[in-house]
Image: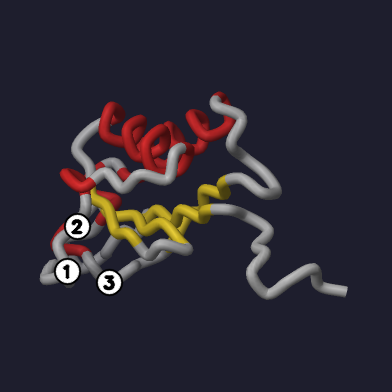
Amino acid sequence: MRESAAMSYYQRHLFVCLNQRANGEASCADHDAQAAFDHCKSRVKQLGLAGKGGVRVNKAGCLDRCAGGPVAVVYPEAVWYSWVDKSDIDEIVESHLRDGKVVERLVLPDAVGR
């Protein structure tokens, strides 16, 4: 029996685009998204955030916001991020994933698409 519709297995779920386009169009993989994903997953584990009731970091295919790459999205808040380096990833993990505070300076503008 399900506990409640409001309960979720994870408190937050981060999807990181790792897509690589073969046709030469811009893609998240062009910005070393795999290294960011690996670092993010490692930080989440180091901080004890991984697992039931916590945070899940997942690989994603194309999220169709390539012009802002690299991109990731956090649910349930549906906050889209782009980043430059590992310190940005650390800030997303510590501020948003752990503390629930959106990192406004890294939020991907709504107008950015493919």
Q: Is residue 29 above or below residue 84?
A: below
* Amino acid type at image mark 1: Asp
* Amino acid type at image mark 2: Leu
Q: Residue 64 carries which label?
A: 3
| Residue drawn at (46%, 53%) of the image | 14
| Residue drawn at (27%, 64%) of the image | 21
Residue on which the image places disc 2: 108
Residue 34 placed where, x, y %? Answer: 38, 43
- Dot 1 crowding, Cα within 10 Å, few <14, some 14–19, many 20+: few
Could you give the CA–CA distance between mark 3 and mark 2, rounded to whole angstroms?
Answer: 13 Å
Q: Describe the element under mark 1 as helix, strand or loop.
A: loop
- Dot 2 crowding, Cα within 10 Å, few <14, some 14–19, many 20+: many
- Dot 3 crowding, Cα within 10 Å, few <14, some 14–19, many 20+: some
Q: Residue 110 carries which label?
A: 1
Relative depth, front residue between 23 and 48: 48
The mark that comes first in sequence, 3 or 1, is: 3
Can you say which quadrant of the picture contains the C terminus? bottom left
- Which of the 4 quarters of the picture holds residue 45? top right
Q: Left of 11 or right of it: where is 34?
A: left
Residue 106 placed where, x, y %? Answer: 20, 46
Query: Contact, CB < 8 Å: mark 1 with mark 2?
Result: yes
